[in-house]
Amino acid sequence: MTRIRITKTLSSLLKGTDALLIVAPKARFDDGSFLDGLPEPLMRLALDLASDLAPGLTGVAAGTLTGDSPRKLAVGVLPDEVSRHNSPARAEAIRRVVSQSSTGKKGSAAVLLVLDDADHFTAAACAVGKALPLFTLPPKKGAAGKGTGAKAKAPAAPKLAIMAIGPDEAPLSPPKALQPMLDYGREAGRLVDTPPTDLNPKAFESEAAKLLRGMPGLTRKSFVGDALLRAGLGGVHAVGRTALDAPRMLVFTHKPTAKSKAKKHIALVGKGVTYDTGGLSLKISGSMSGMKMDMGGAAAVLGAFCALIKGGAPCTVSAVICLAENAIGPAAYKPDDVIRMHSGLDVEINNTDAEGRLLLGDGVSYAARKLKADVVIDIATLTGAQGVATGRLHGGLVSDDADIEATMIEAGRKSGDLVHPLPFAPEFFRSEFKSLIADMKNSVANRANAQSSCAAEFVHWHMDGTDAKWAHVDMAYPAMASGRATGYGVALLAQTVRDLA
């Protein structure tokens, strides 16, 4: 569980460091002048390592022992150019070279980031955080002492310091919001990585309470079990009603200080299916494995909400977190059931594995109708089709507002949590949900017709009749990388709220 801090000076970065990783574009290594502040033996080793590396399109790392201090030196060589749909900070390449170098996984380590622009600091630092997941299993009984007695100390947690220099080779001061984005992005990843029996809906609520403890200007509500029905939240209730742990919806609102002139209210809505069996439409052929990550949207919303409060929220922000385990049991909701949603619309179930949209439909309706939010942004690991549409690194973005869409695309580039727009066209997609007895079905008739956009439109439909603007992020694939959670969405949402406020 590596602890990460951001520092502003080279002396602080190197103090007590066992391992140093220097990350820079290839051209900066070829020039080499940015290394002048390092001891000459380190500078020569770094240049020698980098001279043998070709970064390709995604970056490469190599390391060596120094025979001095720090004991290990590694370089991460980044490509000089990136495409227009990538983060200009080369965030994914940074994540990869940190992972390749193993820096920060033990002892005391440091990363020196060499950036083309001061505005790249946020995405670059968050990329380092993505390479160092927080979650670890509890130590085995007696493992810490290894037979030397109960008082033996556990190994110290690894520590990592990050420093960045800009194009003029001067140290960069981190934005105030950066450390919270980095910290809570990793906390969101920790929640996603947690085994599902350990993180059921009740446990998630407990984790939220811990993360929000002491946060100022906060109001809280929790609808649990049958209280969901009394509040009209039939979608959340149906999905989770047969699980051992009751479904619930958490609602947190933070208002900035009275001095703030910001009038906008932005609500973030997260899908929190703590485990998805598919319900009675059972996932088969191994496709259930990995479904602990189906609460990634809820984790992203919680993390972004915490990061915004810690970093100084620019406007009123709400977090609506919809939690349920999509389990199998005698009370499970069934294909052919009809569910009354918070919006007042009736949904005929034709696929219990299209459950996340039922949670989100209730969540966005509540945010627009009860909280009276001006902007509602939902985020979810919603469709496997997202990976087909926008790939492993770009979330699929659907919005009914061109300005919000453009703002979120740019926020993705700034934060490193990339998004790419998908079509918003209710007139083309609502017919996919035609029902003969209800307002809609919950799953499409034609899975080849822009399935991710259709799923988003199902959610949007439940905001009909409200004045709120809306955006949706499908993060089914960016939520994970190499089998570990990335904390995707925290930086994206926090940056978006700041840019929209």
Image (cartoon, rainbow, N blue to C red):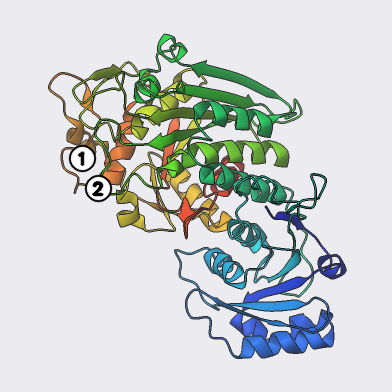
Q: Sort mark 2 into few (<14), some (14-19) or many (20+) by Cα contacts within 10 Å.
A: some
Compared with 113, 65 (above or below) is: below
- Which residue is more in the foreground, 62 or 421? 62
Residue 266 location, x and y as percent? 55, 32
Residue carrying label 2:
450
Residue carrying label 1:
428
Residue 103 falls left or right of residue 320:
right
Residue 499 seen in render: no
Residue at horizontal 67%, vertical 62%? 105
Residue 3 falls left or right of residue 487:
right
Looking at the rendered image, the quarter that the C terminus falls into is top right
Residue 114 falls left or right of residue 92:
right
Residue 192 location, x and y as percent? 52, 44
User: Callout 2, which amino acid?
Assistant: Ala
Residue lying farthest to the top in this orientation? 230
On residue 178, the disc is none
- Which residue is more in the foreground, 428 or 76? 76
Residue at horizontal 19%, vertical 45%? 447
How many angstroms separate mark 1 from mark 2 (CA)? 10 Å
Residue 431 falls left or right of residue 397:
left
Residue 88 location, x and y as percent? 55, 66
Quarter of the image where one finds residue 400: top left
Residue lying farthest to the front in this orientation? 147
Residue lying farthest to the left in this orientation? 436
User: Callout 1, which amino acid?
Assistant: Phe
Quarter of the image where one finds residue 42: bottom right
Name the N-terminal-most of marks 1 and 2. Answer: 1
Quarter of the image where one finds residue 7: bottom right
Asked whether the residues under the numbered discs 1 and 2 touch, taking CB atoms below 8 Å apart as contact, a structural biologist would say yes
Q: Sort mark 1 into few (<14), some (14-19) or many (20+) by Cα contacts within 10 Å.
A: some
